[in-house]
Amino acid sequence: MGKIIRIVSASLLATTTGTVGFNWSKWITPLVEPEYVLSDSVQRVQLTPGEDGLRERVVSWVSGADRSGDSLRLFCGDSLLFRSGPFHKEIRTHGGVTHVQSVTIPSLVAGRYPYTITSGDGVEAYRDTLVIPSDSLQTFVLIGDVQDTWGDDTRPLMDSLYRAHPGAAAWIQVGDLIERPHDQYWRRYYDAFASVAPRIPLITVIGDHENEAGLMYDVDDRWEYVLDYPDNGPEERVGHAYYIDYPDMRVVCYDSNSLFWSIGTQRPWLERVLRERKDQPFLVVCAHHPVYSGTKNRFNPLNNSLLGPLFRRCGVDLVLAGHDHIFAHDRDADGGGPHYIGLSTAHKTYSVQEPERHIASESGARYYGIMTVTQKVLRVAVYREGGTLLDSLSVSRKGRR
């Protein structure tokens, strides 16, 4: 079976390569990262979830110098609950040096937890608060491609979403978070997400813009170490593909950008983690490339031919994707299978191809979704920037399978 999959992958790669026509300037030749220098201070604080998405947190921060002597302290009220020094990684790129520090916080009960990052000499360098929501209802903010460049102004939208949902369990983002793997664009991300990143964990996937351009995509080390996800993924994709469990839902993220080279390991892993699902009544899958593309001249053959049928067989409820820079809601031709939602939260937009074949679709604006999950029902509402409701869906636990 593995050999057959590799043969199919190679054939589809050849077809896709011919379609792309070797646009070397865009896809093959990397753009050189401009030089940058980070200050030595604590900056760009980011939360990600652990495998137990509701209760576990990883806190990372970056700097221009080694801050492995820092200490993260977590409080419950006025009492010190947890203290730890960080894991440290020095990342050298063409443009400069980034030092990443991260601390994994063990399981917490519902509540608000102030935390500080203190330097080795005891001086407080950063203070904020994280929230652990209750296990009876979780809210998730869903966003698409962002890809901010210097002319964009994404922060007001992100600030408004944070104000509306300060107790969200997580934000889920579907790749192309940044324009390119350069410090200038990472800076744009942290500027736009300043109210969210240090308080609510981010679940994201690898998009094509998180990679250096080239025939064999190379994921930016800053993505890997700043966004520190559970090591429960398939061979060679550990940290790039992973799953996170909530009381009533499993979220499975895979790397659709590398499928041509990793379908032989990612597909068996997907089948296993979707089928084992423990006691979660709902299954949500996230990737950058959609199963059903909604824009002209785009088709994702491995997603569509090998993974779409698998998602249906495994009873996946919702598949979230981006890449097309539109909003689109699809299902299989017979009206069954998962709900497929494609989102874009970028200023760059494309046109919807054949709008009549989608359950709902729109282009020309920025879009986001709000998902709520309980033991009995998963609901998603999709909005245009400004709060106009465009679409909604509801999946009930009773009678699903």
Image: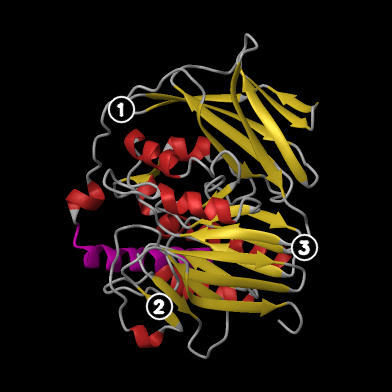
The percent position of residue 287, horizontal first and vertical second, equals: 49, 60
Quadrant for the C terminus in the image: bottom right
The answer for how far apart the CA atoms under marks 3 and 2 are is: 34 Å
Q: Earlier in the sequence, mark 3 or mark 2?
A: 3
Labels 3 and 1 touching (C-beta < 8 A): no
Q: Which residues are magenta?
A: 1-22
Q: Where does label 1 land, which residue?
A: 95
The percent position of residue 117, horizontal first and vertical second, equals: 62, 24
Task: Sort mark 1 into few (<14), some (14-19) or many (20+) by Cα contacts within 10 Å.
Answer: some
* Above or below 329: residue 113: above
Quadrant position of residue 93:
top left
Residue farthest bottom in this picture: 334
Position of 281 compared to 214: left or right? Answer: right
The percent position of residue 151, horizontal first and vertical second, equals: 26, 47
Q: Which one is closest to the eye, mark 3 or mark 2?
A: 2
Q: Which one is closest to the eye, mark 3 or mark 1?
A: 1
* Above or below 341: residue 164: above
Position of 148 compared to 171: left or right? Answer: left
How many numbered marks have been drawn onto this rendered protein structure?
3
Under mark 2, the amino acid is Ser
Labels 3 and 2 touching (C-beta < 8 A): no
Please tell me whether the stretch drawn in magenta is mainly helix, strand or loop.
Answer: helix
Label number found at residue 361? 2
The answer for how far apart the CA atoms under marks 2 and 1 are is: 40 Å
